Image: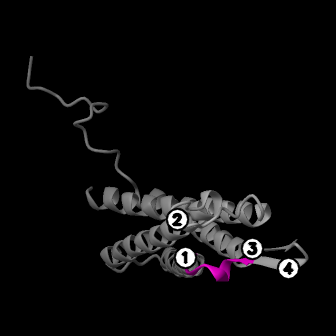
Amino acid sequence: MAGKQANPLSSEAHPLPITHKSFLLSQIIVRSIAAITSLSATILMVTDKQSISLFGLPITAKYTYAPAFRFFTASNSIAFAYSVLSLTYLLLKKAQGSGQKIGFFVFLLDLIMVVVVMAGSSGATAMAWLGKYGNPHTGWLPICGTFKSFCFRAAFSLSLSYVSFFALFLLILLSRNKNTQ
């Protein structure tokens, strides 16, 4: 019996090699998902408005009334713009057939976008939690029982933003896997 051979299915084996074509295709798909979900999250939050009449007085809930929701829309707008620009770059790079060595720069920008989207989503999630449950210690009452449509749209917008976060995070993992080969 000769030397030990590595089992390709073992956890000690290296991940399957990614070809340039499959890496590019996966980048295009995941960046498209990130762009679509961050744009959708932004549009949903910006158009989220509900008015009710309470004791004859009109009361309105809008995303602009909460700084966390404004930051959320800004962070998702930035992520959308970055995703579209990086997707455009990838498509032009594919069309030209040339590739400059700026992979690390794109990796860093992807990492920054992950942090920006997570920061915006976290702040908006905290605000949404307060809207749903309130804070009895400070006297903040929950509003989602009254503004159901507003809260539902905000929750759906948050869900889309978290999908965008995971797509951007997946881009980092793809780049890391590609760079280790």
Q: What element carries label 3?
A: loop
Q: Are marks 3 and 1 in contact (CB under 8 Å)?
A: no
On the question of residue 90 being in view, the answer is: yes
The residue range painted magenta reads: 61-68
- Is residue 142 magenta-colored? no
Q: Which of marks 3 and 2 is nearer the N terminus?
A: 3
Identify the residue at horizontal 58%, vertical 66% (top origin): 139
Tags 1 and 2 touching, CB below 8 Å: yes
Q: Quadrant of the C terminus?
A: bottom left
Q: Is residue 97 left or right of residue 3?
A: right
Query: Looking at the image, which residue is at 53% across and 76% down?
Result: 79
Label annotation for residue 14: none
Residue picked out by circle 1: 68
Instruction: Tell me the CA gap for discs 4 and 1.
Output: 24 Å
- CA gap, disc 2 to disc 4? 26 Å
Label located before the other in sequence (1 or 2)? 1
The numbered dot on residue 48 is: 3
Along the line of sight, which residue is nearer the eye, 31 or 68? 68
Q: Within 10 angstroms of label 3, few (less than 14), some, or many (20 or more) residues? A: some
**For the residues carrying marks 2 and 4, which lies nearer the camera in this image?**
4
Asked whether 63 falls inside the magenta stretch, the response is yes
Mark-to-mark CA distance, 3 and 2: 17 Å
Tell me which amino acid carries mark 3.
Asp
Residue 130 rendering spot, x and y as whole percentages: 58, 63
In the rendered structure, are the residues bearing label 4 and label 1 in contact, judged by CB atoms less than 8 Å apart? Answer: no
